[in-house]
């Protein structure tokens, strides 16, 4: 199992004062910083690699949604069950790998 990465929170004004550090954490340690404005989440600073992967993931999810839209309810149910079963297998494999 992968180790969870640290997630930071900072007010925008505070992050501005240590912007180089915030960028380095995102870029080299893969640690995102949630930028807060008036106590609410405003944005997240992440590495460029994470951003690019998120764009690819979104495109894949949109393509899957379009493809599922062309299926009957019965076909969608079969696909959902297949995906659920595969996810359970992956979770099990990941958990077994962590125990080694």
Image (cartoon, grey):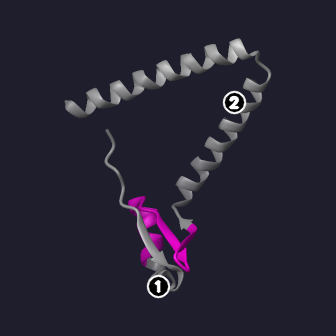
Q: Position of residue 79 (x, y in %)?
A: 62, 17
Q: Quadrant of residue 56?
A: top right
Q: Secondary structure at mark 2?
A: helix
Name the residue at 44% across, 83% down.
Answer: 18
Image position of 85 with respect to 59: above or below: above
Q: Which residue is drawn at the image coordinates 57% and 47% (left, top)?
A: 53
- Comparing 77 with 67, the one in front is 77
Question: Residue 64: where, in percent of width, then height?
Answer: 69, 30
Instruction: Kindly identify which residue carries mark 2.
Output: 64
- How far apart are labels 2 and 1 at the CA level? 40 Å
25 left or right of 39? left
Q: Residue visible at 31% across and 48% down? A: 3
Q: Quadrant of the N terminus?
A: top left
In front of the other: 39 or 95: 39
Q: Please identify the residue farthest to the right as the structure is shown.
A: 70
Q: Is residue 90 left or right of residue 50?
A: left
Segment colored magenta = 21-43
Q: Is residue 98 left or right of residue 47?
A: left
Q: Residue furthest left?
A: 100
Q: Is residue 27 magenta?
A: yes
Magenta stretch encompasses residue 37? yes
Q: Determine which of the numbered discs, if any, sits on residue 14 in the image.
A: 1
Q: Position of residue 58 (x, y in %)?
A: 66, 43
């Amino acid at each position: 199992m992968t180790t969870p990465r640290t997630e930071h929170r900072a007010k925008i004004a505070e992050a501005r004062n240590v912007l180089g550090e915030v960028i380095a954490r995102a870029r080299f340690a893969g640690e995102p910083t949630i930028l807060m404005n008036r106590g609410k989440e405003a944005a997240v600073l992440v590495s460029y690699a994470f951003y690019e992967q998120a764009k690819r993931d979104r495109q894949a999810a949109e393509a899957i949604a379009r493809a599922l839209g062309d299926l009957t309810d019965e076909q969608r149910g079969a696909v959902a069950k297949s995906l659920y079963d595969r996810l359970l297998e992956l979770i099990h494999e990941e958990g077994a790998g962590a125990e080694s």
